[in-house]
Amino acid sequence: MASRKYENLKKQKQTILLDAKRDTAAFDRISKEARRVSEVSANAAVILRDLDRQFEQATKLTGTDISFLFFATALQCIRQYLLTPFKERMTDKESAKEAHEEERNLFGSVSVPDGQDKTKRYYASLNDIILQGVPYDTQFGSADFQLGLSGSAHRFRTLGHDPLFGWVFGTANIMTSTLTDWAFQSYHIKPSPMADGRMKPKIVQHASTMLMMEKVIERSKTEPQALALAVIKQRLHLKSDLFSIAGLPLPGMTALSPDAAQMLAEHGVDTANMLTVGKQAAYSILINTMIAMIHGLFYEESFGARNLYDVRTRKILTYSNLIASASNLIAVAIMEAMAVATSNAELGRNGLRYLDVGGLAVTIYRIVSDRKFIKQVKQEFLEKEFYQLVMGETIEI
């Protein structure tokens, strides 16, 4: 009995000793972990600087990346000087030459049915639609209604010349032999004798804009050919004026303020230049997209995390856009300085034709967006690496 009791006490003692050793070992691990975390905390600034260097090392451009950078920069420069310069402005006659040639080719084969050759109120004959100029070009009689349509001003005071409203009101004017001004007031156009006896289209009377549109809708149902011819005529007329010296107003600007539309156009802010800037931006984005896609194909797992490789791609795009835009600004500035020094106005105009406004806008966007992306990836990298340093190995108690 006594020996059994002794054995039980001995087992209890051994169990207590084992538990004590286990607890001591756990406490030692906890103590070591606490000291390690304390050391990490005390040296946080040094560790973060080291992690920052690791990030820069992981995302720095390699030899292959540099090749992509030069290639992308070359493409942007070629685009700037060969594909997207501003077009040289021409006289009205020169600007309309191509459109008039296209008009002759398109309308030359159009046959007009019998009985469709008489123009009347709110109804322009098919012959007049095909053969006559657009009615909203009429200036004769403008003074009688104080419309101020003399010279190039008529392009900023008639809705037919507006690249947006013109598709509706210009087409309607062609189909009804009318003119609609910036205030949506319409007028009848009719051949009238001039002082020398010659007949010339003249603004003769007020017309109802609402009735004009109703007549156009009705005729479009019964004579779709008239609508088709008027739309073609409208397109060709806008094309003929687009790159002329006076140009065309910004879309929708005529209805807001004809004076502002004309003032902006005189300072280069018109539809033609807006289209060129859009083309510059679109081509720049296309090149960036192509470079990003091709560079992405070179990714390998040995390079590290994919988002770190994407940082290298973003750097290539930002640097190439920045170099191309900076070189463009310098080149244009040099040309303008030479133009001023030599009093060469022609050189000055040619220099400004190569100003890459759309590309510069894309560059600014890339600097902002890519910097934000790189900052975000860097933050995630630092947080992940620092977290692993702090947590270390999982502690089992």
Image (cartoon, helix red, strand yellow):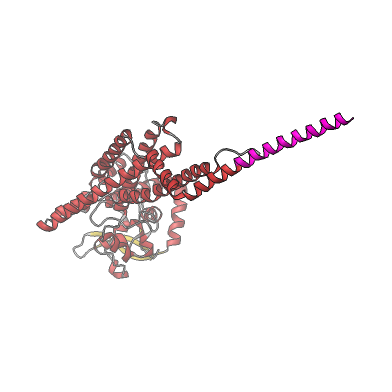
Secondary structure of the magenta portion, mostly?
helix
For this rendering, which residue is in front, 195 or 177? Answer: 177
Q: Which quadrant: the C terminus?
A: top right
Which residue does the image show at 15% across and 56% down from the upper left? 337
Q: Where does the image place residue 98, in percent across and percent down from the top left? A: 24, 44
Q: Residue furthest left?
A: 342
Magenta extent: 1-29
For this rendering, which residue is in front, 28 or 300? Answer: 28
Which residue does the image show at 39% across and 43% down from the upper left? 53
Left or right, residue 149 beside residue 115: left
> In the image, is residue 91 above or below residue 4?
below
Q: Where does the image place residue 182, in percent across and percent down from the top left? A: 36, 63
Q: Which quadrant: the N terminus?
A: top right
Q: Where does the image place residue 162, in percent across and percent down from the top left? A: 35, 56
Which residue does the image show at 78% across and 35% down from the upper left? 12
In reply to whether residue 4 is colored magenta, the answer given is yes
Q: Where does the image place residue 180, in percent across and percent down from the top left? A: 37, 61
In reply to whether residue 23 is colored magenta, the answer given is yes
Which residue does the image show at 34% across and 47% down from the upper left? 281
* Res. 220 visible in picture: yes
